[in-house]
Image (spheres, rainbow, N blue to C red):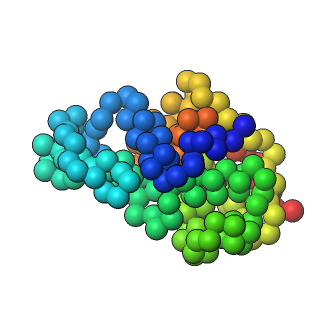
Amino acid sequence: MFPFELLSSEASAANLRQQVRWREGLQCPHYRSESVIKHGSYREYQRYLCKDCDRTFNDKTGTIFAHAKIGLDKLLFAFYSFLRFNTSIRQLDAELDVSYRSLHRRVEQFARTLDVPAISLVGPSEIDEFYVSAGKKGRERDRESRSRGLSKLGQGTYEGVQATGVHTR
Ligand SMILES: [Zn+2]
């Protein structure tokens, strides 16, 4: 079941993002220091200051959502719809009234983060196996992703999204 209420606004999506991202504790994405304090906000997102490296970051820094022009609520809906219903980027772009280029780029990044091999964003694609679990597996995968400098989507029920065998029809 799609968590509509969690994505009803960018603020709501931002709140979810914050909870999921720091569930194992707040940490500076630059050198992993935990000596971090709240430091204003960046649009809908909490901003932080690292007392060790003196740099600031927010809930999206160092993730595939960083610097996105498209709101997080729309992006999460797009990822979900793209994977779950094979919605094309063109359709999503029209539905969500966002830039085709930006959306295409984010979906591509998202697919890369999931380690989907050579995903085709043109034409309908099919995903053999798609399942979500909020279990331990999700957290393990998340840690792996983070060590490559990426933070997986990891949003509530999306934790541990796994997709294997993507074929273009
Ligand atoms: Zn730092």
Q: Is residue 165 left or right of residue 45?
A: right
Figure quadrant of residue 81: bottom right
Front residue (pair 119, 45): 45
Residue 74 image-quadrant placement? bottom right
Which residue is pictured at 55% across the width and 24% down the height?
A: 136
Q: Is residue 109 left or right of residue 4?
A: left
Number of marks drawn: 0
**In which quadrant of the rendered image does the N terminus lie?**
top right
In the picture, the quarter occupied by the C terminus is bottom right
Residue beneath the point at 78% across and 41% down: 129
Residue 142: horizontal and vertical position, in percent?
49, 37
**Image coordinates for residue 119, horizontal then vertical, percent:** 69, 60
Question: From the viewer's perspective, is residue 112 above or below residue 152?
Answer: below
Q: Would residue 117 be found to the left or right of residue 57 on screen?
A: right
Whether residue 144 is visible, yes or no, is no
Q: Nearer the viewer, residue 82 or 77?
A: 77
The x and y percentages for residue 79 are 63, 54
Give the residue displayed 62% in from the left and 71% down from the top. 97
Q: Residue at x 50, y 47 (%)?
A: 13
Q: Is residue 10 visible?
A: yes
The residue sitting at the right extreme is: 169
Q: Is residue 117 above or below residue 136?
A: below
